Amino acid sequence: MSPATHTRPIAADAALALTIAVALGAAITVGGGFWSHTFGGDLHGLFLQRYEYVGRLASHGRLGWWDPYQFCGMPLLGQMQGGALYPPVLVAFALFPSATALQVLLTAHLGVLSLGMLLWARQHGADAAGGILAALVASAGVIHPLAVTNNHPSFLFCLAWTPWIVRAVERALADGGRRQIAAAAVFVALQWLAGYPDFPLDVAVLLPAVIAATPGRTLRVRLAIVAAVLALGTALAAIQLVPLAEAVRESPRPGESGQYAEIYAHLAPTMAQAARRRWDVHGPAVLAFVLLAVWRDGWRVAGPLVAAAWCALAFRIPFRLLYLLPPFSSVRLPFGWQYLEFVFVGLLAAVGVAAATSSPRRAVRVATRVTVATLVGVRVLVVFRAPGSMPDRVPDPAELDARGALLARVGARLPDARIVSPKDSAFGLWLRRGLRSAGGCDPSVPPARVLELLAAAGMSAAEPAVAPARLAQHAALAARLGVGAVVVPQASGAVLGAAGFAPMATLPDGDLVLARKPVPRVRLVHRLLVVDDDRAALTEIAGAPDAETTAVVVRGPDLPAVDEAGGPGERAAIAAESPETIDVDAVAASRALLVVRDTFYPGWTASVDGTPSQILRVDHAFRGVLVPPGRHRVRLAYRPASFRLGAAISAVAALVLVALGARTDRARVRPPQ
């Protein structure tokens, strides 16, 4: 499909895109907004609390590396869906109150998506009516009743950059402009940073199909340009992707990949189901315009048509075979295809509208414009109805504030303890209130060993829940995890009370806060229980009677020796800390192991009185540092090599892109005549 020359100023398209975005943003707001609506808890539990946290850091000129509040501590950059390095999230949540920031982000990305669709449609000869329809097909497709996007804003953020990527690549193929290659790579990087890796992975597959029919260059050159764009864009986002790869390696994800095939097979529709879904989702009028585009333009729309078909059949054989290969084999919930389809269908519909409005018959032209106007109205109505269709609602903000304030007082009374509350994990309370928890809202790549300890103690994280009977049975293990307070329904109070959990407070909804003394967050131990592997460590930890004076370690060549006898006056206390550093003052009568009850993770370093020291993994998931006799200052600092490596790769990619963007028109590579 050959890009056409623009006949309409870009400012006019920008004004039109802004109008569409404001109309859709107003429809969402009047329809109830997404702030108080949920589709499964992820909006508040997973996204918003992280957006707010990184926004607060950005407002003070900082970037966050470590989240000390969830899962006994976890890497903030490893949780890609938190948008920790996505510029729009940082700016919006640094400048505005949270509810306003979310609305600003939704509206802004609807504008980015609409403008991208308008310009891309214009590039292929569509008029204003076709461009508007393309923008509305994509926008209403990603925000519609019961769409997962409504609970996962990163879906819209990722989708918004798709037409910009394809448009820039097509322009680079048409005139050999290096600046377009650089621009396309920047858009690819933004799509990566937006927070849902499935989208850029899917675009990397679909992009060659889209440009396959672009004339003017050999197939080898076309594929080389696409490869350069994808490689440079991915390298530019390496500052986020390398820490993400490390987080995936440390999560349960590698061991779960065999289960994903069942998910993919379940998502596979029959041909009849696929056809019915196209009819229900797009509607007969849009499909008619698509068919008209195929009939009138033939092979010139083959690329977008193949891409749309791939999206529709992504989980059928042979397309599903893609998920046998890395990195697709590690994708747990591949939602990207169903939303990317709207982008390609929107473009095809715009081309069909252009064909209809160029008809010599006035009646056809009038009918086309009336149909487009009707479709626009229908899609605005769809967006308006989307918030109200969400099945769950967040409780009243006043109730959440009262609940959060009470738990904050609990946290102040138990500064050494972690709180476990499945309901408050779903409300995103931990980062919002700065409270520490042994669990959290499942961020898809939590630290695997902490999850194993939680499960052994009767606390699930994937679907946050507490099993009172199991927790009562393994109260000592919960104490080793640092659990000092649990929030449970009143019916569970008696079961946990028998295990030493005492009532501490009652929340507004009647839930009980039960407290039990945890193992201190920092402690000196002189007795090491040495086991052969992690499985044995879990068994030993669950049955160890004296957690305060013992530590479980796995046998290894670097295992240090400690003195079995301690002495009076030994103590350890946190002197100062930030999310990325902990200073501990320790006084040891003899050589001891300082145990810090926070997640053991790559990137943490230790020093004793300024001298580097090794960090051991103790109690299956936590940190230990050998301390000699005497008084010492132990510092633990999070300085991940994954971040430094990713930042270096991103810096090199940025220099390459600057060099490409700085080339003048005379440096362009002209297509062969």
Image (cartoon, grey):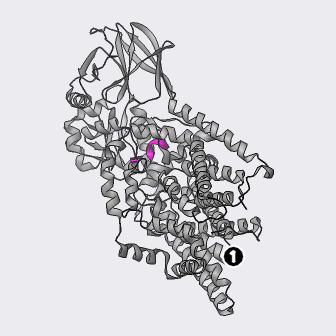
Q: Using a 10 Å C-alpha cutoff, classify the residue at mark 1 as few (fewer than 14 neighbours), some (14 to 19) or many (20 or more).
A: many
Q: Nearer the viewer, residue 264 or 561?
A: 264
Residue 170 in the image: state x and y as whole percent: 64, 61
Is 158 located above or below residue 3 in the figure? above
What is the number of callouts on the image? Answer: 1
Residue 429 lies in the magenta stretch: yes
Residue visible at 59% across and 84% down?
371
Is 153 located above or below residue 564 in the figure? below
Q: Secondary structure at mark 1?
A: loop
Q: Quadrant of the C terminus?
A: bottom right
Question: In the picture provided, is 16 more to the left or to the right than 420?
Answer: right
Q: Is residue 214 visible?
A: yes
Q: Nearer the viewer, residue 591 or 420?
A: 591
Is 472 located above or below residue 491 in the figure? above
Q: Residue 175 is drawn in which quadrant?
A: bottom right
Residue 298 lies in the magenta stretch: no
Q: Residue 430 is drawn in which quadrant?
A: top left
Residue 536 in the image: state x and y as whole percent: 22, 29
Which amino acid is tagged 1? Asp
Residue 314 in the image: state x and y as whole percent: 42, 63
Q: Quadrant of the N terminus?
A: bottom right
Residue under circle 1? 127
Q: Main secondary structure of the magenta part?
A: loop
Q: Which residues are magenta?
A: 425-443
